[in-house]
């Protein structure tokens, strides 16, 4: 079950990665026309509406992205089926359709059906479509119906399945929707404390990839909060809209890079050069783009107490920003790029104070991390026991990703042991026959930030934002065998 949920989290990264495009378009549009929101400038209106087209249709992107990511061979017909699934359920359970089914006036229909086109529905549609693809994509029908065999059968079966799902959702959705709204309102009613609770659990769920589910409640329109969409559309209340985003900026732009510096300073002298390269790259990624996984996975499993402290500090940061009503927003993550783009959004409130808060959190992160690491002798990067550091000479002269991929693949046991290779934004996700055959020392000698064994046959290698290049090289190796 956990493996399946991790696959879902990975699949969600595909549509979530589209958000920077919306942020750039809308950010530039608001920068051009910060007061008229496009009304005073046709170029600004063009850009804002273009960005809005992405934000407003995230549910469809989720349906397509999840269907594609969860299908066994990432085929386009699975993505098409995800769209079909979404169209079926949102049409059948629309307010007007439900009014016809119930024989009542549309105004008397439960308000939940007016919100059926949420990210939750998109995710559900994608999952159903992927299941149908994995089950029916290779089914051969009798000759008279052979045209509809295989992948052409998938959208048809998806439509049938979604009719059954729609029937269940007809009764379940109003209850689920009410629960989500109550949960969201319960947290939002707690104000700054609620934002802090959200920030804490947001970080705690990252190791198992379930933070996306929590994010969907607060960032998107699952429970009516829609913090990201409302911020970039400049809707809501100034100083409140954006409260579930703002507190991440001090952590990702300042706190985590300061933590990286602390880990560098506490590393063994003989390993400082290697650790410096790792921490510099991870810290820069966190500061500029808000991509924190390369840094977080560097200490998440080797020093879980440190990660727990990080989660607490993140919660505190969100609570502080919310308490003082300092707000800024992001389209992808809380890095410098999104911070700059959000400055001209009319609803942003005293965003520069987040930089002041960030400097304070940098000091807290640095000294607290350094104290805990040395006090409890935590095995953060550069402090672990010596391992075999042998690696190929002359990497710079050749393809460093090819060399890294070859060493990682060899450490995994090669063709004799590796059964499946996939990747997300920063991690290689692999299935092996025998975990005992995996040489973790060999893999770590390539300089990867970390390794995470998530099951009897499942292992993740944390590579960083260049993971795609390593995954491509491994694919070449497997193809040549």
Image (cartoon, rainbow, N blue to C red):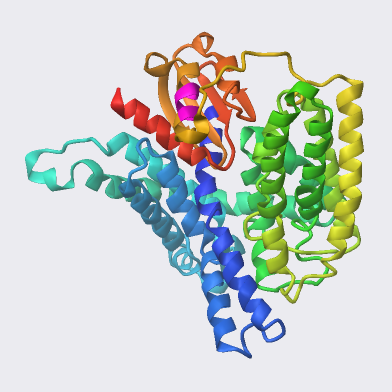
Q: What residue lies at 73% left-to-right and 50% top-to-bottom?
A: 183
Q: Looking at the rendering, in which quadrant would you find the C terminus?
A: top left
x and y percent of residue 125 in the render? 45, 49
In the depicted view, which residue is nearer to us: 11 or 402? 402
- Asked if residue 406 is among those painted magenta in the image, a careful observer would answer yes
Q: What residue lies at 41% left-to-right and 37% top-to-bottom?
A: 472
Q: Residue furthest top?
A: 436
Q: What residue lies at 62% left-to-right and 45% top-to-bottom?
A: 212
Q: Is residue 223 left or right of residue 156?
A: right
Q: Is residue 12 left or right of residue 311?
A: left
Q: What residue range appears in magenta?
A: 403-408
For the stretch drawn in magenta, what is the main secondary structure? Answer: helix
In this picture, is 224 found above or below 428? below
- Asked if residue 104 is among those painted magenta in the image, a careful observer would answer no
Q: Is residue 339 visible?
A: yes
Q: Is residue 1 visible?
A: no
Q: Residue furthest bottom?
A: 40
In the depicted view, which residue is nearer to us: 237 or 16? 16
In the depicted view, which residue is nearer to us: 299 or 128? 299
């Amino acid at each position: 079950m956990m493996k399946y949920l991790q696959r879902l989290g990975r699949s969600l990264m595909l549509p979530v990665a589209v958000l920077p495009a919306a942020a750039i378009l809308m950010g530039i549009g608001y920068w051009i026309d910060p007061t008229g929101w496009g009304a005073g400038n046709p170029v600004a209106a063009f850009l804002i509406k273009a960005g809005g087209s992405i934000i407003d249709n995230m549910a469809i992107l989720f349906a397509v992205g999840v269907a594609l990511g969860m299908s066994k061979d990432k085929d386009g017909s699975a993505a098409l089926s995800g769209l079909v699934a979404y169209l079926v359920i949102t049409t059948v359970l629309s307010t007007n359709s439900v009014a016809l089914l119930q024989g009542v006036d549309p105004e008397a229909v439960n308000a939940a059906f007016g919100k059926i086109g949420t990210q939750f529905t998109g995710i559900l549609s994608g999952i159903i479509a992927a299941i149908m693809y994995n089950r029916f994509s290779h089914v051969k029908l009798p000759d008279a119906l052979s045209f509809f065999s295989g992948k052409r059968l998938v959208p048809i079966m998806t439509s049938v399945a979604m009719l059954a799902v729609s029937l269940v959702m007809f009764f379940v959705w109003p209850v689920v929707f009410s629960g989500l709204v109550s949960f969201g309102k319960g947290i939002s009613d707690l104000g700054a404390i609620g934002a802090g609770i959200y920030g804490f659990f947001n970080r705690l769920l990252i190791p198992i990839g379930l933070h996306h589910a929590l994010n969907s409640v607060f960032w998107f329109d699952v429970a009516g909060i829609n913090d990201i969409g409302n911020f970039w559309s400049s809707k809501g209340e100034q100083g409140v809209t954006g409260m579930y985003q703002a507190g991440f900026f001090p952590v990702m732009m300042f706190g985590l890079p300061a933590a990286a510096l602390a880990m560098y300073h506490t590393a063994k002298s003989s390993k400082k050069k290697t650790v410096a390269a790792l921490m510099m790259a991870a810290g820069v990624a966190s500061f500029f783009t808000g991509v924190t996984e390369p840094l977080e996975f560097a200490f998440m499993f080797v020093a879980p107490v440190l990660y727990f402290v990080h989660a607490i500090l993140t919660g505190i940061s969100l609570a502080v920003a919310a308490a003082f009503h300092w707000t800024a927003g992001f389209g992808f993550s809380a890095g410098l790029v999104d911070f700059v783009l959000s400055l001209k959004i009319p609803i942003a409130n005293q965003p520069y104070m987040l930089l002041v808060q960030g400097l304070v959190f940098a000091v807290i992160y640095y000294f607290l991390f350094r104290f805990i690491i040395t006090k409890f002798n935590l095995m953060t990067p550069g402090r672990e026991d010596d391992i075999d550091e042998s690696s190929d000479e002359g990497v710079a002269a050749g393809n460093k990703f090819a060399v890294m991929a070859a060493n990682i693949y060899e450490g995994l046991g090669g063709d004799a042991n590796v059964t499946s290779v996939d990747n997300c934004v920063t991690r290689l996700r692999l299935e092996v026959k025998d975990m005992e055959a995996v040489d973790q020392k060999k893999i770590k000698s390539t300089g990867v930030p970390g390794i995470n064994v998530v099951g009897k046959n499942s292992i993740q290698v944390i590579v960083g934002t260049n993971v795609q290049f390593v995954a491509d090289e491994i694919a070449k190796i497997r193809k040549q065998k």
